[in-house]
Image (spheres, rainbow, N blue to C red):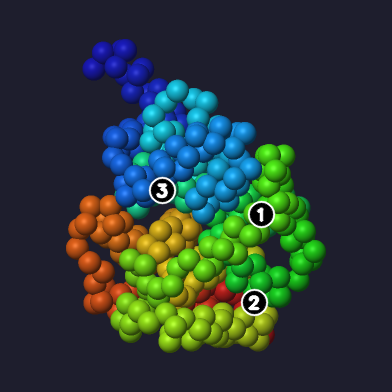
Amino acid sequence: MTKIERVLIDYVKEHRKPLFLIIMTFIGFFIRFAGRDFVSPDMRYFLLPWYEEIQQNGGINGLGTQVGNYNILYQTLIALMNYINIDPVYQYKALSCIFDFGIAFLLLKIVNEKVIDMKGIAVFSFAMIIPEFFLNSSIWGQCDAIYVFFCILFLYLLRKELWAYAFIALGAAFSFKFQTIFFLPFIIIIYITQKKFSILNFAYTILAFWASGIVGYIKGRNILEPFKIYFSQTKTDINMVKNSNSIWVLIGDDYNALSKGAILITIAIFGVMLYWLIENNCTMDSKEKYYSLAAWTLLTCYIFLPCMHERYSYPADVLLLLVAVINPRYSFVFIYSSILSTITYGMYLFNNGAVSKAGIIVYVFVYLIFTKKVIDNKDGLGFSFIK
């Protein structure tokens, strides 16, 4: 071996952590770049027509009129795209992919707050290459990465007890997707069991959400428009299942007969969990306990609530990845959930197969095992209880 080779190898070994993160960043970028030209049904029938309609309305000057069913902030970003001379397909995807990387760095920050170790490198690397994540942004062109980034930021800031910043981040998440509401059960559980923050902090969320529509108000929108948009969304989905791995695939798709029962069952599950945690004086003194409970609440919503789309598993799977890296014994939950989610993505994007009832039955068993691990302290996987 030459001296130059030896010096080069020694340098790489000494700086292996930052170099590996840089390499994974490039790999993540090129994976997403490869999907830039794919036009998904959502892109063809919704996002591109919205872009064209906002363009015809005058870009920013046309924001006084509602286009599509996404909220004003996302419409504002679409309007700004009109002033950039780049294919709108690329712009939509680039916007979402930016937050893909944001989520990866945020997960790294959560796992390694001071010194980067193997777990931090692992969570960042997996976030770069897991099919579900890049399919959502760079193939589908959806904006789930945006609202999920702010939701994860909310969880991080809430655990740091930075209440104002946390609830502002929650408001930013709501500005992009109403599905942020799936984090509400976790917030309620933490509020009741930990008794650390006031319910009045939701004022920051409401204010941040309302302020996201400021450009629309200037252009003539009603100041309550952001709330009205989401209220109208609650009336659009009238199916028990929308290509998801919901338990209701096993039962039926009669929304009128089943939806209220599904909601009440979900509330009951959360009620039982809350009662258990109160009864046992639970603590939240570790990342594992905190984020595993958050992941569990999201997974519960996805499996049991009506009207679940395949993409609604996205925030749960991001948190399951985080928990699996923090404690690898949770890996089976993340792997199975992400595989099922990826299959439903393939069904929608590439017409590849159908939801498997057998797969969902296994999913329910995996969920039950995960639930046990969240509440069982015998093997150190879940909560530590104070009798």
Q: Between residues 16 and 75, which one lies in front from this camera angle?
A: 75
Q: The C terminus appears in which quarter of the rendering? A: bottom right
Residue under numbered circle 2? 282
Residue under numbered circle 1? 225
CB under 8 Å between discs 3 and 2: no
Q: Amino acid at mark 1?
A: Glu
Q: Amino acid at mark 3?
A: Phe
Earlier sequence position, callout 2 versus callout 1: 1
Earlier sequence position, callout 3 versus callout 2: 3
Q: Quadrant of residue 94?
A: top left
Q: Label 3 vs label 1: CA separation?
A: 20 Å
Residue at (59%, 37%) from the top-left corner?
Answer: 62
Q: Is residue 301 left or right of residue 185?
A: left
Element under label 1? Answer: helix
Task: Looking at this view, name the residue that lies furthest to the front.
Answer: 56
Q: Label 2 vs label 1: CA separation?
A: 40 Å
Q: Residues within 10 Å of mark 1 (few under 14, many from 20)?
A: some
**Nearer to us: label 2 or label 1:** 1
**Nearer to us: label 3 or label 2:** 3
Q: Is residue 35 visible?
A: yes
Residue under numbered circle 3? 46
Query: Residue 132: where, in percent of width, then height?
Result: 35, 52
Q: Is residue 246 above or below residue 154?
A: below
